[in-house]
Every structure is written in structure tokens, then in C-alpha cells.
Image: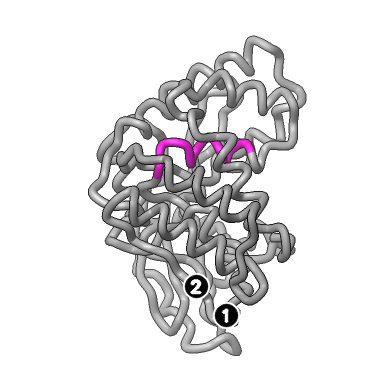
Amino acid sequence: MADPPSPPPGPAQYEAEIPLNAIDLFPRKVGPRIFHLPDRGAILKVGTNVKMAEAEAMRFVSSRSSIPVPEVYEAYEKNGLGYIYMCKVEGLELAETWSSLSDDKKAYVADQLRGYVRELLDMRGDSYGALWNQPSEDIFFSHLCLTSHDDKQYGPFNSRIEYNQGLVEALTNSRPGGQLGESENSLIAKITALTEDVKIFSHGDLHLSNILVDGNCKITAIVDWGSAGFSIPGREYLEANLRARRPDWIKLLDDVFPEDAKAEYHILKELDRALILYSGF
């Protein structure tokens, strides 16, 4: 692969630093920009929130499992922007074809996902958080902080006790003035009673648009590992459900995930709802 273009020194020169033949795949999308570089058969993901832990997550999963992920060619940060060059995987987003699939095809997708979910559940770590000992990307720590205007980060956490303390801190920060009431204290009691201390690797954003399939519904890649990291057992199932909109997809998720991955679902869902009570997101 040829050397990548030099990263831009600032927003004003951003466009000039992207190869002329690069195709912006999602020009109206807010967030990181995704370019197709046709002469290299590559994808470039670039943005202020593109982190090296995402590239490391794809490398980690590729080396530890049979889960199909894009091959990472190069990843680096410069001038406040993150760059990930990866191979372009052929396939359609499952979201584009899901409604037209037969029950047999949907069952085939479920069978594949079931195996991949099991592989993720078997990957263990030493702390809760993103790879390279980075803060957690779990949804609980991504909501608006009302007690500070600064971007608040949580973790990494060495134990479930520390992780639970992070959840309590996030809940406190979601309240105006950090004031907790009776309902919050009741929820905190439920959270601190969760003591299973196992760090499981999770994608964190497993929805139809992040699963690519070929014409036979074979999964060719699971993409967008920006939220990946080691977390509690119930994180993957919860976040997949929170983003699910189609009833048949929700039913499939329930079938794909084993019972041990759902054990804390209702408490975690209650927590997530509580975290957005005042901010809305």
C-alpha cells in the first residue's frame, strides 16, 4: 500500500489533504468521516473522535477470534485528528436488506451472530475500559454531564467495585447540581449489589448498519469498533437492544445472546433511562 497522505494541520486545510479520488461515503452524517479510496481498495476513517483504541480493537478481535473485521493497514493521530486506514470489505449493510430477507436467511444470520457473540463473551481482560488502558466507552459514561462543561471520562476501572463507583458518579453528574433523590439512591443500591467481576470484550454498537453481509447473507464483517472495550457481561446485550428498532431484530437478539449475558439487563436499562432523565441524551 502506498504511503497515506499527510494529515491536515487544521480544519481549514482538511479537504485539501484528502486524496482527490476519495469518495465520502456518508457526506451528511455527523461525526467521523468515512472515505473510500478506490485506488487502494481501502477505507479511511478520520475525525476528532477517531481513537487508536478502535484500530487496536479490530486487530485484537482479528487475532483472537474468527469474527470478520476489516484489516487495519495503519492508524495514527496528528493535529487533533485520528486516522484509521483499513481494507474495504465487500458487502451490504444488513440494514439495507433485512426487511426483504426470508425467515431462513434471518435464521442463518442469527446462527452466525450467535457464534460471534459467544467468542466475544469468551474474551477476557484485566480492567474495564477500552484497549491500551483507555477510558470506558460504555453508554453509561457517554451521556451529558450536568455538573461540568468539560468532557468527562470514566475509567479504566480495575474492579467491579470501581466500575460501579463510576456508574454512581455518572448518575450523580447527570443530576442538576449533583443532587440525588430517593429514586436515585434506590437505584444506586441495586447497582452496588451487582458484584460479578469479569471483564468481557464487547463491540458496544451491534446493530444492523454495523453488520455487512454478502448476497447469501454470510457475514463479511462487523464494523465500527469505536465503542469497543472490556466491560460487564450485560453491556453488549443492553446496548444492542437500546439501538434496535425492528421487532424482529429485537427478537433475534434475544435468541442470539445467552442468558448469562442478559442477567443484569433490567437494572442496566433502568440506569440508562435515569441517566438521560434531565438531559434527554
- In the rendered structure, does residue 237 fall within the stretch colored magenta? yes
Q: What amino acid is labelled 1 in the image?
A: Ser
Which residue is painted at 31% across and 41% down in the image?
A: 197
Which callout, 1 or 2, points to the residue nearer the camera?
1
Q: Which mark is residue 148?
A: 1
- Look at the numbered discs 1 and 2 and tell me whether their residues touch, using CB distance below 8 Å: yes
Tell me where residue 154 sits by quadrant. bottom left
Q: Which residues are magenta?
A: 232-241
Q: Which residue is mark 2?
A: 152
Height in image: 7 above or below 158? below
Dominant secondary structure, magenta: helix
Instruction: Kindly give the residue lying farthest to the front in the view shown.
Output: 182
- In the rendered structure, does residue 100 fall within the stretch colored magenta? no
The quadrant of the rendering that contains the C terminus is bottom right
Judging depth in this view, the residue of 89 and 113 nearest the camera is: 113
Find residue 70 and report its horizontal and vertical position in percent. Answer: 42, 45
**Residue 77 seen in the figure:** yes
Q: What amino acid is labelled 2 in the image?
A: Lys
Which residue is painted at 57% across and 80% down in the image?
A: 148
Q: Which mark is residue 11?
A: none
